[in-house]
Image (cartoon, grey):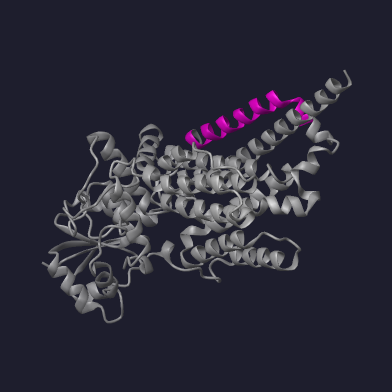
């Protein structure tokens, strides 16, 4: 009887703790989603959003996977695959249902889900209030990548993948086999799925550092899991081509240094992220926290990748806290979830536990309300810096024809509107073989001869340029006439 009475309070306390954690995480996700709703238009600032949606729309219309480029005239017919087809389909379905508001709502939902799973896995080791507060900070630091592109759909996946693998390592268990299904989904959503192999390898190294060779059967299971990761990624419409296409970006792609998101970290432009990195490194160096050499290598790896390419900001800021949370909890008990579990509940936590279902319903209403406001209160649209809406209306009204030489940022909108591009954002597979270097050279101070050569080589019939395109003076010098101009776009036509 006494034993049974002892078990009941423990079970009740565990159930209350799970409810409290769940409510904290749900509130965090709903607050982020609601806070992002008024700024939904900022998720559509990337020029690639246009062509990502268009590829998905074309797939839904044709139900075929492209193998050659159908969108440019400079590389028409060259090998090209829609390796991120599923993410593009998600975007196109959202667009078909709700227009650009639907796309923005889907992206915000994915960000909210990322916040939820991050807070949930952090709260497995850290007390909920600490986990949620840390999650808010991390969500703010990675905000530059909140754009309407398929990579956002992989953020919850990479959080789950990393947290579950490193937890299995910490608890000296085999990796759960269901994660293989997750990496198949990741592979069809976005090309960053090859990072899953690297993360799994670091988790395996962490286990090896802890156990050595004392558990050979467990190590064999980890090795088998690691070998299966690339194999299951072949469950993709393009098979091994998807993996090879990803690797070509990482090694020797000439376009990488010319694209903003692929450029290295720039402290004056990323001053908040720099401050966060310095604070984190200062904390690691001055605290008594011990994380082991494998996790130290993981931190170095994620920091290196971020400093090399801005687009990978989330690797350092999202994944490092997930990986070191267990050591923080063990070495700083005041922050740990286990100590919190045995503490007396305060009034707010008692309210959360006692009104669980009511609060879940209120959270759902809040999220639905945010979605309705986003859909009905105002219309969002891609940035005018990428849409060239006025210029394209002019081109349509004046029946401009022939090959267009376009600025890079207008490539996406041209694809979306069915106009063959000179260049666009698909430089991971196309516009190579010296093309991007030649195009970049036309914008330098001595670039007029190169520009003239490009105009002749590709039989350019008109030019659609951003208002700050450095080639504009050359068009004037070559005798081209400015036919249209607004704050964002300029159209030039040959003098004849």
Up the image or down, 248 lies above or below 471; here it is above
Q: Main secondary structure of the magenta part?
A: helix
Name the foreground residue: 469 vs 492: 469
Quarter-of-image position of residue 452: bottom left
374 above or below 75? above
Camera-nearest residue between 405 and 308: 308
Q: Position of residue 78 (x, y in %)?
A: 18, 55
462 shown above or below 42:
below
Q: Residue at x 46, y 42 (%)?
A: 104
Q: Is residue 357 magenta?
A: yes
Tell whether 57 sits left or right of 322.
Answer: left
Q: Residue furthest top?
A: 1
The x, y position of residue 479, in whole percent, is: 17, 73
Locate the N terminus and report the quarter of the image it occupies.
Answer: top right
Q: Judge by depth and name the residue closer to the eye, 316 or 148.
A: 316
Task: List x then y, in percent, for residue 276.
Answer: 64, 63
Q: How many marks?
A: 0
For image coordinates 23% across by 38% down, the residue present is 64
Seen as rendered, the residue at the extreme bottom is: 446
Which region of the structure is painted magenta?
Answer: 351-375
Image point (21%, 73%), residue name: 451
Residue 168, picture quadrant: top right
Does residue 486 appear in the picture of this structure? Answer: no
Residue 453 shown left or right of residue 9 in the figure = left
x, y (%) of residue 170?
Answer: 64, 48
Foreground pick, 282 / 11: 11
Tell me if I can see residue 67 in this picture.
Answer: yes
Question: Which residue ends up furthest to the right in the rendered image?
Answer: 2
The quarter of the image holding the C terminus is bottom left
Q: Is residue 373 magenta?
A: yes
């Amino acid at each position: 009887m006494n034993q049974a009475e002892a078990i009941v309070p423990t079970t009740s306390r565990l159930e209350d703790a799970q409810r409290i954690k769940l409510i904290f995480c749900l509130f965090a996700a709903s607050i982020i989603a609601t806070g992002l709703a008024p700024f939904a238009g900022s998720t559509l600032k990337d020029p690639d959003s246009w062509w990502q949606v268009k590829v998905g729309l074309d797939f839904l219309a044709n139900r075929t996977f492209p193998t050659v480029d159908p969108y440019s005239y400079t590389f028409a017919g060259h090998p090209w695959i829609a390796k991120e087809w599923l993410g593009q389909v998600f975007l196109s379905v959202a667009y078909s249902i709700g227009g650009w508001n639907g796309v923005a709502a889907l992206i915000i939902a994915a960000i909210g889900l990322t916040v939820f799973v991050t807070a949930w896995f952090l709260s497995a080791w850290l007390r909920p209030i600490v986990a949620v507060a840390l999650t808010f900070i991390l969500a703010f630091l990675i905000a530059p990548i909140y754009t309407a592109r398929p990579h956002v759909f992989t953020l919850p996946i990479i959080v789950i993948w990393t947290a579950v693998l490193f937890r299995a390592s910490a608890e000296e268990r085999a990796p759960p086999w269901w994660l293989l299904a997750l990496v198949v989904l990741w592979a069809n959503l976005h090309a960053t799925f090859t990072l899953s192999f690297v993360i799994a390898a670091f988790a395996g190294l962490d286990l090896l550092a802890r156990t050595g060779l004392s558990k050979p059967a467990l190590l064999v299971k980890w090795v088998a899991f690691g070998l299966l990761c690339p194999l299951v990624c072949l469950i993709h419409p393009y098979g091994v081509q998807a993996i090879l296409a990803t690797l070509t970006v990482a090694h020797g792609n000439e376009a990488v240094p010319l694209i903003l998101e692929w450029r290295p970290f720039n402290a004056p432009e990323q001053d908040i992220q720099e401050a966060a990195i310095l604070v984190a490194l200062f904390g690691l160096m001055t605290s008594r926290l011990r994380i082991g050499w494998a996790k130290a290598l993981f931190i170095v790896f994620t920091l290196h990748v971020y400093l090399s390419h801005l687009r990978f900001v989330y690797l350092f800021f999202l994944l490092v806290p997930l990986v070191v949370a267990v050591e923080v909890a063990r070495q700083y008990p005041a922050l740990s979830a286990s100590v919190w579990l045995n503490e007396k509940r305060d009034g707010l936590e008692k309210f959360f536990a006692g009104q669980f279902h009511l609060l879940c319903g209120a959270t759902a209403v809040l999220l639905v309300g945010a979605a309705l406001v986003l859909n009905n209160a105002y219309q969002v649209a891609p940035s005018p810096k990428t849409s060239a809406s006025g210029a394209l209306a002019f081109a349509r009204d004046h029946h401009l024809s022939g090959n267009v030489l376009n600025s890079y940022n207008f490539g996406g909108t041209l694809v979306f509107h069915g106009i063959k591009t000179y260049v666009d954002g698909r430089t991971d597979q196309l516009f190579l073989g010296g093309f991007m270097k030649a195009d970049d050279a036309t914008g330098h101070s001595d670039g007029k001869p190169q520009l003239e050569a490009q105009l002749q080589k590709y039989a350019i019939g008109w030019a659609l340029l951003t208002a700050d395109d450095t080639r504009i003076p050359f068009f004037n010098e070559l005798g081209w006439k400015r036919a249209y101009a607004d704050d964002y776009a300029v159209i030039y036509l040959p003098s004849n």
